[in-house]
Amino acid sequence: MDASGVAPVIEAALPKGVRPRQLCARTWLIAILLCLADGRPAHLSRAFEALLRLPEADRARLGVMGTWKSGPHLLTYRQVWHTSALVFAVVAKTRPDGQPSALLGGLADALLEASVPAFAAKLSTSLAVDWTDLESFARPPLYDAGPSADPDASWGHRRGNGPGQKDELFYGYYLSAATMAQDEGGPPAPEVVRRATLTSCHVDPVPAFVPVLEDMAATGAAIGDVLADSGYAHRVAQNWALPLRAIGAKLVMDLHPADRGPRGTFSGAICCNGNLYCPAVPPALLALGPLRRDASAEQGAAHDQKTAELAHYKLSRVSADDNDGYHRVACPAVMGKLRCPLRAASMALSHTRPSVVSPPGQPPACCIQRTVTVPPGVNAKTAQKHDYPSAAWRKSYARRTAVERTYSTIKDPASNDISRGWCRLMGLAPLFVFVTCCLVVRNLRVLDAYAERQSAQARRAAAGLPPKRRRRRRKTIGDLVAAAPGAPP
């Protein structure tokens, strides 16, 4: 709490009354964190009870037991409610627009960043981003534009990917979070939440999260890979892809089905899946999609072989992006990746490389020039770090499950379940404060588990034992049959 510097900022913004308040902002926030650390709902009465359960010395230190003219005075629930109302009124916008105020967003960023130690922040620069539903305690209005107890909430859409789950509407908010994921080839990193924001459902959560990441980069935090699903890729490039590349991020994302496959040409080269390909590339290779989840090992090997062959037809980069986002690419035959009659020197390559059988009758610029300058507007929405949908992309994109685990832990009925009724205060500001504190508590739990794993690995290494491997939990029908050979049919 003290490392974040949030409490003095809130205290300075609160109105000054005739009599000083017994409950300060620092103690108020600590009460919320204590309440959520016990796995209790985000109710002010629970936070008040958490303060009363403290030892006598801590109650005196935090101001729970104050000294008045009439003698010692124990904090009352009315004082907790009054301080909460003052804080929420200060951090909320005077004219609500479905997004948190600059003060509220800055306080949330400071709390989350303070919950991540310096050593953990240096372990990885990759972020997995996604949004989820957060239902309001208020019931939706009975008719369009009707009154509601939560004026900031609105109708949203949520989708379940599990078996039997259906799409449905809900009344509330979109919660967006950026969870730290392990870098490619880097050391294991704790999956802590670095940034989060809360918006009403009538606000698109994708462009609303861009300023949060830009502010994070402005503080000096390095942002490497940004892992996102097709919900982020299927957007206007100016709302997601281009701003993130401007702050140095490398996108790893699943393309929307509407964006897959050939999408026009540039200087004769085919624009497909974020790359430029030779005009003579076989159409079957351009039609490749991502590997199915239930694909067998043989199907996966065949798919990877085709994507590797497609890479031979890709125009290769010969320069990095300049200050304006321009870069240069060269013909794959010039780079020695395939044989083409239009490039006489390439015909001396080994026959193990693909060969262009029927080159274009009127060669375009990409087949005549040695290099082609590509502006940033080409493949602006679909360009990413790895070739889509290659094996390298699939392995890198699998790290995006870090943010899914974030939402599964804060929706766990055994601890902090943020489903409807978890917080009975209505409005964007109260919900965002409580959700931020919930994510802070989750970060501390993740860091404790990470420290325990690291110490266990160190003990095994000191004893000369190999690192402990995760057990395979899934049992197939064959495993069950083999376990009971004498079982009846």
Image (tube, rainbow, N blue to C red):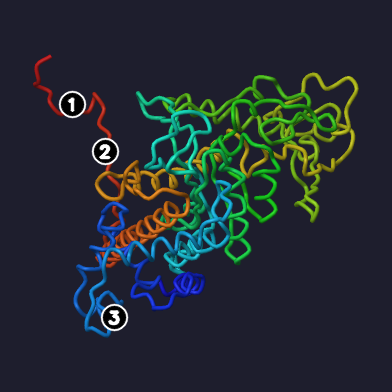
Residue 276 location in percent, x, y?
74, 34
Q: Label 3, on which residue?
A: 61
Look at mark 1 in the image and give the residue it sits on.
Answer: 482
Residue 473, numbered circle: 2
Q: Are marks 3 and 2 in contact (CB under 8 Å)?
A: no
Residue 53 located left or right of residue 439: left
Q: Which numbered disc flags the more N-terminal residue, 3 or 2?
A: 3
**Mark 1 element type:** helix
Mark 1 crowd level (few <14, some 14–19, many ≥20, 10 Å Cα): few
Residue 181 seen in this snapshot: no
Q: Amino acid at mark 1?
A: Ala
Q: What x and y, as percent, mark residue 453? A: 31, 59
| Vertical position of residue 334 compared to residue 125: above or below | above
Q: Position of residue 409 (x, y in %)?
A: 34, 47
Q: CA distance from mark 3 to mark 2?
A: 48 Å
Which residue occupies 47% across, 37% down? 147
Residue drawn at the location 69% of the way across and 20% of the way down: 283
The first of marks 1 and 3 along the sequence is: 3
Q: What residue is rendered at 35% in x and 25% in y?
A: 163
Q: Is residue 297 above or below residue 35?
A: above
Tell me whether circle 1 and circle 3 mark residues in contact (CB < 8 Å). Answer: no
User: Closer to the camera, 17 or 131?
Assistant: 17
Crowding at label 2, few (<14), some or many (≥20) Cα neighbours within 10 Å? Answer: few
The N terminus, quarter of image: bottom left
Q: Whole-Å distance between the Cαs marked 2 and 1?
A: 16 Å
Give the amino acid at mark 3.
Arg
- Dot 2 amino acid type: Arg
Compare residues 346 and 454 and report the one nearer the observer. Answer: 454
